[in-house]
Amino acid sequence: MLADKCKYGKCTHTKEPGCAVLEAVKDGLIPERRLENYHKLKREIEYNLSKHEARFRNKRSNFWKNVGKQAKLIKKSRGEH
Ligand SMILES: [Zn+2]
């Protein structure tokens, strides 16, 4: 795997100084095309993830809205303000 060569855990392999993948491309050890494909694939995965995340976030915000409502009702029923 391309990313395994890199010392950074969350490296994007685009502009990080000392990135092993960028070094390898510079030295001709990894063809630039392969790095491009890697970024393309990563973008696709991130796009799919962000779609899922947005859906999840919507659900979650509804969840917290409901929690707030429930908490208010409970406080009211207890006579707390
Ligand atoms: Zn890297």
Image (spheres, rainbow, N blue to C red):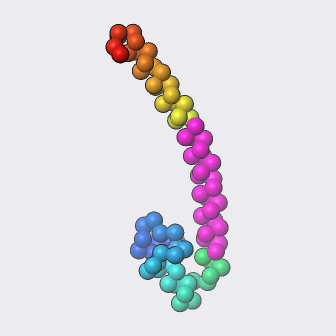
Instruction: In the rendered view, tell whether residue 41 sits above or below residue 7.
Output: above
- One can see residue 2 in this view: no
Residue 69 vertical placement versus 39 (above, below): above
Q: Nearer the viewer, residue 68 or 26?
A: 68
Name the residue at 60% across, 41% down: 55
Establish if 65 lies above or below 5. above
Residue 2, percent from left and from top: 53, 74
Q: Residue furthest front?
A: 81
**Side (left or right) of 40 relative to 10:** right
Residue at x 57%, y 89% (from the top left corner): 28
Total of numbered circles in the picture?
0
Residue occupying the point 59% across, 44% down: 54
Q: Nearer the viewer, residue 47 or 65?
A: 65
Taking depth in this image into account, of 81 and 52 the one nearest to the observer is 81
Q: How far across and how far down the image is residue 16, in percent?
A: 47, 75
Which region shows up in magenta? 36-58
Q: Above or below — where is 73 with respect to 4? A: above
Q: Is residue 54 magenta?
A: yes
Main SS, magenta region, reads helix
Magenta-colored stretch includes residue 17: no
In the rendered structure, the answer to whether residue 28 lies left or right of residue 79 reads right
| Quarter holding residue 58 | top right
- Residue at position x 47%, y 72% from top? 4
Assign the C terminus to one quadrant of the image. top left
Q: Would you say residue 66 is visible in this rendering?
A: yes
